[in-house]
């Protein structure tokens, strides 16, 4: 399912349809996360991925137009590079542990400690919450920094001051409405 | 075979994203490709965190086997970061469109070469 939507995303040239399909893609990803026991991730993906990302794409589309031109030459370089990477990845996948194997190296190091002691040590029964807010709190702090930086960047790029300065020596764009994000 | 099916599906998505990022001329389409690539990495992490027969990592007296909570935490962070990068990329696309009045890469390059 996900793969089909992914292919459609790459092949369709109408960008409005692409924006709508990203929403469907995110929703399917949320279902996949649910099936893999990652309920918190599914929440976040459904809210942030399906909601905010789609809105961002739609807002951009209202500014830049909604059709993509057909490329002139076949992208042989990209096809070759992708086949090469595909071969390498499949070769590497034979070293991976089996899917769902409880003895895989990922589950041996710190994960048992989190699952066994975090409900008593931190409090909430949801282990993802305890790890996110307590054991790996600095990660979350860094994430806040990244989001802040992105917000400042978007404001600097689309803020009123810069636009006025550029407007003077450039021909006005055809649909130069103010962008709300 | 089924042991690797999830990994291969993830790889297919990853390559799809890579292809869209390299091959498409349209900048918005490139951002979409980048998004597909990012989600494929999320799938890889979550797949590795799954324990067969385990349940969601929420403590309950009825269960003893849980999936690994650590990849879930990392991916929670990564999803939010991916939205931040998407927002920044799309803001850049809008600015490029204002300066060049096109978001097709070949047009932008032609315009750059026309007026040094």
Image (tube, rainbow, N blue to C red):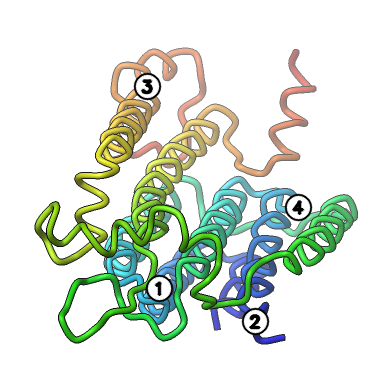
Q: Secondary structure at mark 4?
A: helix
Marks 3 and 4, how far apart at CA: 31 Å
Disc 3 vs disc 4: Cβ atoms closer than 8 Å? no
Name the residue located 42 percent from the left edge and 54 percent from the top edge.
Answer: A57
Query: Which residue position is annotated with label 3?
Result: A163
| Tag nearer the camera, 2 or 1 | 2
x, y (%) of residue A48? 31, 58
**Tags 3 and 1 in contact by the CB under 8 Å rule?**
no
Which is in the foreground here, disc 3 or disc 1?
1
Q: Residue at x 67, y 44 (%)?
A: B104
Closer to the eye: label 1 or 4: 1
On whether disc 3 and disc 2 are found on a single subunit, the reply is no
Check disc 1: other Cα within 10 Å, few if <14, some if 14-19, many if 20+.
Answer: many
Which is more foreground, mark 3 or mark 4?
4
Q: Which mark is residue B3?
A: 2
User: Depth check: A132 or A180 in front?
Assistant: A132
Q: Looking at the picture, does residue B62 appear above or below residue A167?
A: below
Q: Nearest the camera: A99 or B37? A: A99
* Number of other residues with Cα within 10 Å of mark 4, as a class: few under 14, some 14 to 19, many 20 or more: many
Q: State the residue position of label 1.
A: A33
Q: Are marks 3 and 4 on the same chain?
A: no
């Amino acid at each position: 399912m996900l793969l089909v939507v992914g292919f459609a995303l790459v092949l369709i040239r109408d960008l409005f349809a692409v924006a709508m399909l990203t929403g469907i893609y995110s929703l399917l990803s949320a279902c996949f996360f649910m099936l893999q026991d990652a309920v918190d991730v599914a929440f976040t993906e459904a809210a942030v991925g399906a909601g905010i990302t789609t809105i961002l794409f739609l807002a951009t589309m209202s500014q830049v137009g909604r059709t993509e031109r057909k490329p002139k030459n076949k992208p042989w370089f990209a096809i070759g590079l992708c086949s090469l990477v595909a071969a390498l990845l499949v070769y590497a996948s034979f070293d991976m542990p089996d899917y769902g194997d409880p003895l895989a190296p990922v589950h041996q190091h710190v994960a048992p400690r989190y699952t066994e002691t975090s409900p008593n040590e931190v409090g909430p029964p949801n282990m993802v919450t305890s790890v996110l807010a307590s054991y790996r709190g600095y990660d979350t702090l860094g994430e806040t920094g990244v989001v802040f930086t992105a917000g400042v960047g978007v404001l600097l790029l689309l803020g009123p001051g810069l636009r006025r300065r550029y407007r003077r020596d450039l021909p006005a764009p055809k649909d130069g409405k103010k962008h709300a994000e | 075979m089924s042991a690797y099916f999830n990994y291969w599906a993830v790889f297919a998505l990853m390559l799809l994203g890579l292809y869209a990022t390299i091959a498409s001329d349209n900048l918005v389409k490139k951002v979409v490709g980048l998004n597909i690539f990012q989600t494929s990495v999320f799938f890889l992490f979550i797949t590795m965190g799954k324990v067969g027969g385990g349940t969601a990592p929420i403590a309950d007296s009825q269960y003893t086997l849980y999936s690994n909570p650590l990849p879930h935490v990392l991916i929670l962070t990564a999803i939010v970061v991916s939205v931040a990068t998407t927002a920044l990329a799309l803001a850049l696309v809008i600015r490029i469109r204002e300066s060049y009045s096109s978001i097709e890469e070949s047009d932008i390059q032609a315009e750059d070469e026309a007026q040094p």
